[in-house]
Amino acid sequence: MHRREGTSLGFSVALILILSGMILGCGDLADEFKSRALIREGKELYQKEEYADACSRFEEALTMRAADLQLKQSLAYCYTALYDPAGTTPENAALTDKAAALLREVLAATPDNAKLREAVLGLYVNANRHRDAIAFLEGVLQQAPQQVEVAKQIATLYAEIKDFDKAYEWYYKWGSMDPTNPDPWFTIAFLAWKRAYCDLVSGRCEEPTFSTKDRAGQVEAGMKAALKGLEVDTNHAELCAYLNLLYLEKAKWIDVGDAAKIRVDRQEAAKYRERAVQLFEERKKKQALELEQAAASGTPGAAGELSPELQNALSDATPAGNGAGEASPAAGEATPAGKDGSAKEKVGNAGQ
């Protein structure tokens, strides 16, 4: 009798456990169907550019699919689309933080995903949060120290916010990581000349508050970088052209008052100007030949153009008050490569 009761009790407990599991399983299945429906609705709303409603659907779906990386990525892009660059509310600013947090979580699981890295970078830059972008990229380099493109981006970001001491430091790091590339040295030479330049006649200066010592420091930094670049590529026409310009600034800010040194400066400027002209002519002939060959084969091609300051520097005309072959600065700074300000079409296959 007792044995039968014990058996019956054991059977009842087992039945309860089975039924409980079935109920829980049904709950999980219901969440799965509901989350898929929410994701589908979110995508449809996103494509209609109804971003606020789309984000709310993705948010609700994420409560049921907390480990879904693709859903997190879709929600991040939705926040990005909802963000207003002209907005000033805390809620608007928080969208960048929420999107970045989600993308960085996905990136942590897929550290080699360069597109995601660029997406996080774009978020910060488009929100004018360059310091956050730099901190993010420095973290990337800590995990993978040999990523040359990341060092280049950090240098460019520092230049964009006019922290030139840090920019030069990172251009040097880029150069040490990429020893066969003259571009970091050319960039320093360009920025340093642009900052040192000042027209003594018109008073037009990129850095109007600079002292003579400040300008001399920029000239020295630019010349040092340009000469390093020519060690990498002896036929770099732009480096030769900027050495021409830097020697002319050297005569104004370092050797001013010393006629003998100024004469040497102008001779060196003329030497590099002549070399630059020669290299540009060779390039022009090569491009013309390539265009002829492209036309003959039906393949489109295009020749490069010189920047305005180099056109002035290498022309026969001498701008008034600037000295032989001297140019004035061109407007604009370099921007990070790979910025992507658009979130459209990025909502992918979450939940599918």
Image: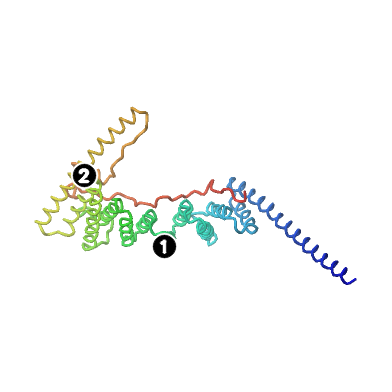
Residues 79 and 287: in front is: 287
Residue at the disc numbered 1: 142
Which residue is the extreme one toward the right? 1
Counting residues from the N terminus, which is met first, the one under dot 2 or under dot 1?
Answer: 1
Instruction: Name the disc covering residue 202, or none.
Output: none
Outermost residue toward the bottom in this view? 2
Marks 2 and 1: which is nearer the front? 1
Q: Position of residue 104 (x, y in %)?
A: 50, 58
How far, Cα to Cα, is label 2 from label 1? Answer: 40 Å
Residue at image point 14% right, 53% down = 265
Q: Position of residue 233 (x, y in %)?
A: 25, 48
Q: 303 and 203: which one is in front?
A: 303
Few, some or many C-alpha atoms within 10 Å of disc 2 (few <14, some 14-19, many ≥20)?
A: many
Residue under the point 71% across and 54% down? 29
In depth, the one of 180 and 202 nearer the eye is: 180
Q: Which residue is mark 2?
A: 276
**SS of the residue at dot 1?**
helix
Quarter of the image with the N terminus is bottom right
Q: Seen from this angle, which residue lies furthest top?
A: 296
- Residue at far left of view: 260
Q: Amino acid at mark 1?
A: Gln
Indicate how the structure is coloured in the image: rainbow
Q: Identity of the amino acid at label 2?
A: Ala
Q: Is residue 300 left or right of residue 9?
A: left
Could you tell me residue 68's position as x and y percent?
59, 55
When the figure is inspected, residue 128 is found, relative to residue 40, above or below; the finding is below
Q: Position of residue 329 (x, y in %)?
A: 27, 50
